[in-house]
Image: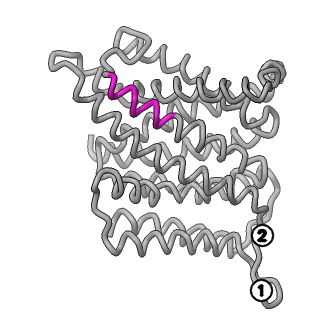
């Protein structure tokens, strides 16, 4: 199918926009840690059903030990660290600004690939990263007299940075894991095994995420919050929607998209979420959006595009 990768990338951007809006409400009602634990359980249930129908087993049938290691590590970095930071940023200042910081993920992935995989980092990549950072700064820093100050709480900004960095590093680790997974698939395996490989990779990441969030809640003696969250019907509805459009659809299709088009094009299209979320977020929360914020977001997206396409 022509432009399949590009179409999938746009679907991912829309899916992540929906995820951010649903997660904003769910994180406020349930809390970041209980929501993430519940989200991991729900995503494993959804992925198990899909793998059972498509491959014949409700788990990643052909994943090697190396694939499990790298994908699980990706789950710890991307889910346990990255998503914990992301959902806490939603609590501090909402999903619109939270998604703005997710534009740090592609440059972070580029730097991580350069450091650990020996991937090329040209001078244009560094320039693009500078443009991305400038766009974020332009959106969140305002002039106050003769000085400048953050218009957002520092705590939320740090959570946002952690979310973008965790996502970027987790993406590179996922790439390594999927390469090991692909190498372990037998030549005579059904075509569906390769097609559903991104969903199998997401399954392994979710297992690591589930264990990580459970241990954190247990060590903090806050598992009781999960029980309380389960009785919040509205919160659980939004948690289910967050899971469906996030780990199940968004993350899995993002891994699939890069198989059908250039990674740079896919990453640029998927990075449109901060732009797509502006209108629905402002309508839902009756929040005024300034021209400076829109311009800053567009500059940030331009930086992401430069990073991959120049």
Task: Name the quadrant of the C terminus.
Answer: bottom left
Residue 123 falls within the magenta-colored stretch: no
Tell me which residue sits at (36%, 15%) in the image: 54
Q: Position of residue 292 (x, y in %)?
A: 68, 75
Furthest residue in direction left, as rendered: 187
Which is more toward the observer, 290 or 212? 212
The image quarter containing residue 67 is: top left
Tell me which residue sits at (35%, 25%) in the image: 196
Which is more toward the observer, 99 or 152? 152
Distance from Cα at disc 2 to Cα at disc 1: 13 Å
Residue 71 falls within the magenta-colored stretch: yes
Counting labels gives: 2
Position of 72 with respect to 226 (left or right) is: left
Up/down of 18 relative to 142, above or below: above
Which segment is the magenta one? 65-75
Furthest residue in direction front, as rendered: 219
Q: Position of residue 1 (x, y in %)?
A: 27, 40
Up/down of 216 relative to 12, above or below: above
Q: Main secondary structure of the magenta part?
A: helix
Tell me which residue sits at (57%, 34%) in the image: 245
The image quarter containing residue 178 is: top left
Label 1 CA crowd tier, 10 Å (few <14, some 14–19, many 20+) = few
The numbered dot on residue 188 is none
Secondary structure beneath label 1: strand
Q: Position of residue 28 (x, y in %)?
A: 80, 40
Q: Is residue 281 visible in this depiction of the protein?
A: yes
The numbered dot on residue 151 is 2
The image quarter containing residue 243 is: top right
Position of 115 with respect to 86 (left or right) is: left
Disc 1 marks which residue?
147
Q: How is the image coloured?
A: one colour
């Amino acid at each position: 199918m022509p432009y399949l990768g590009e179409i999938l990338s746009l679907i991912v951007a829309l899916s992540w926009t929906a995820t951010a809006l649903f997660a904003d409400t769910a994180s406020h009602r349930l809390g970041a840690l209980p929501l993430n634990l519940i989200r991991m359980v729900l995503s494993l249930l959804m992925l198990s059903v899909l793998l059972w129908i498509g491959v014949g087993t409700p788990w990643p049938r052909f994943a090697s030990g190396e694939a499990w290691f790298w994908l699980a590590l990706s789950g710890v970095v991307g889910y346990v660290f990255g998503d914990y930071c992301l959902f806490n940023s939603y609590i501090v200042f909402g999903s619109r600004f939270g998604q703005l910081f997710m534009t740090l993920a592609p440059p972070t992935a580029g730097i991580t690939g350069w450091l650990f995989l020996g991937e090329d980092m040209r001078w244009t990549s560094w320039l693009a990263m500078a443009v991305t950072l400038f766009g974020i700064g332009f959106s969140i820093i305002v002039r106050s007299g003769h000085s400048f100050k953050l218009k957002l709480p520092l705590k939320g900004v740090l959570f946002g940075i952690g979310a973008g960095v965790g996502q970027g590093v987790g993406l590179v680790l996922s790439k390594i894991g999927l390469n090991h997974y692909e190498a372990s698939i037998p030549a005579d395996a059904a075509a569906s095994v390769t097609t559903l490989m991104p969903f199998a990779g997401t399954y392994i990441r979710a297992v690591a995420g589930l264990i990580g969030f459970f241990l954190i809640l247990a060590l903090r003696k806050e598992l009781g919050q999960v029980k309380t969250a389960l009785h919040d019907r509205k919160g659980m509805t939004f948690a289910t929607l967050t899971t469906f459009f996030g780990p199940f659809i968004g993350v899995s299709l993002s891994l699939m998209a890069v198989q059908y088009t250039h990674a740079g094009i896919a990453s640029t299209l998927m990075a449109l979420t901060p732009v797509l979320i502006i209108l629905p977020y402002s309508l839902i929360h009756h929040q005024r959006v300034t021209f400076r914020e829109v311009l800053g977001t567009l500059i940030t997206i331009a930086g992401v595009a430069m990073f991959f396409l120049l």
